[in-house]
Image (spheres, grey):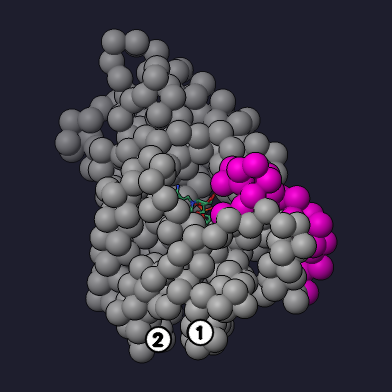
């Protein structure tokens, strides 16, 4: 069962079907999920489950789920695979840079509930992540930049050499230079795999590093919906988190400056100014985030490039200040 979207399926489904058929994985069925974060929903999850059941009704033969598309597909299709008959195998074929470096790897799958991101989900590791970088050629420039935001995230908190490389070679990356993409995607997958291997179920306080920029980013993404992509919201969240870190004395101002410069050179927003978001809405959405415990929120803050620490913040005034960093 190939889950895809009308756009990505139109471009690549035939090739995927031909490959599966050549390998003897038949019959091949297709179900489309419409584009847009609002469709990473329980409604679309149910539609996909029903499609899976109607194509593969035999309870003795587990279907293989192939998620062809961006992070929306790996999150939703992975969740369907993780729950259908208590779990069937899945393969991700990520076709956005963001999904290649992040969403497709690591086994977190989920859908949103209303405006709460990823509220309903589980861990379900794909059997395989099959990345064909040639698919990125049809990606919009905006979606490519959105993926670059997650690449910058890896550099900022996990790898100073990667960050330096991005500062030097950003123009090539923005031009989707094939050999650089190959190096960068492989490096990000390695970094993510290392973190996930050390803390697969997000219980040891290590996997949270991948959440840099996301505490605010998720709330901004939902508050601004549909005006910010995931990567754009994370870009704003990373700058605000770095400013917060500098304000607390955890990192020097140069970290904020270099991060802000790189993000803005990548054509990504460094603040949510102009979106006219209500600070109280962002704050409320942030407090809904599942990382909040006992009214506290956990932020990942850079301490220098390539290193991080976490802080818990419960004081509403301090949280308002962080939201202000993102909106001013
Ligand atoms: N599970 C995780 O660990 C994890 C990590 C990061 C992000 N995510 C999730 O990923 C989602 C965002 O993923 P995304 O940025 O990939 O967006 P997306 O899946 O919504 O895709 C963005 C757009 O790109 C189009 N597209 C995809 N591939 C294309 C291609 N090759 N050519 C042309 N168009 C193409 C899609 O049709 C869509 O319009 C969010 O829901 C986010 O929460 C999950
Ligand atoms: Zn992300």
Q: Relative to residue 241, is residue 305 drawn left or right?
A: left
Q: Total number of numbered labels? A: 2
Q: Is residue 253 magenta?
A: no
Residue occupying the point 18% across, 31% down: 24
Q: Quadrant of the C terminus?
A: bottom right
Between residue 294 and residue 271, name the one nearer to us: 294
Q: Which mark is residue 252?
A: 1
Mark 1 vs mark 2, CA separation in Å: 18 Å
Q: Quadrant of residue 275?
A: bottom right
Q: Which residues are magenta?
A: 274-298
Q: Which mark is residue 232?
A: none
Q: Which mark is residue 167?
A: 2
Q: Is residue 278 magenta?
A: yes
Between residue 200 and residue 52, name the one nearer to us: 200
Q: Is residue 85 above or below residue 150?
A: above
Q: Position of residue 294 (x, y in %)?
A: 65, 42
């Amino acid at each position: 069962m190939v889950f895809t979207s009308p756009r990505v399926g139109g471009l690549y489904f035939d090739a995927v079907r031909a490959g599966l058929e050549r390998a003897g994985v038949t019959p091949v069925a297709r179900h489309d999920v419409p584009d847009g974060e609002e469709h990473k929903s329980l409604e679309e999850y149910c539609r996909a489950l029903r499609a899976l059941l109607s194509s593969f009704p035999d309870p003795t033969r587990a279907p293989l789920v192939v998620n062809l598309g961006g992070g929306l597909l790996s999150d939703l299709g992975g969740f369907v695979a993780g729950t259908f008959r208590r779990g069937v195998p899945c393969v991700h074929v990520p076709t956005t840079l963001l999904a290649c470096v992040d969403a497709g790897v690591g086994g977190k799958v989920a859908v949103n509930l209303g405006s709460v991101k990823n509220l309903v989900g589980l861990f379900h590791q794909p059997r395989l992540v099959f990345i064909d970088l040639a698919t990125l050629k049809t990606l919009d420039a905006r979606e490519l930049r959105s993926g670059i935001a997650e690449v910058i995230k890896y550099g900022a908190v996990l790898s100073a050499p990667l960050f330096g490389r991005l500062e030097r070679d950003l123009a090539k990356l923005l031009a989707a230079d094939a050999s650089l993409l190959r190096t960068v995607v492989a490096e990000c997958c390695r970094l993510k795999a290392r973190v996930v291997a050390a803390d697969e179920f997000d219980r040891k306080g290590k996997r949270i590093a991948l959440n840099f920029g996301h505490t605010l980013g998720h709330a901004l993404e939902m508050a601004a919906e549909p005006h910010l992509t995931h990567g754009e919201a994370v870009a704003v969240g990373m700058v605000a988190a770095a400013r917060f870190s500098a304000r607390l004395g955890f990192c020097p101002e140069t970290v904020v400056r270099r991060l802000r410069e790189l993000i803005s050179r990548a054509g990504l927003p460094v603040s949510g100014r102009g979106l006219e978001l209500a600070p109280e809405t962002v704050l409320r959405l942030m407090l809904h985030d599942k990382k909040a415990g006992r009214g506290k929120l956990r932020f990942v803050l850079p301490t220098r490039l390539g290193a991080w620490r976490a802080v818990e913040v419960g004081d509403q005034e301090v949280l308002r200040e962080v939201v202000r960093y993102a909106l001013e």
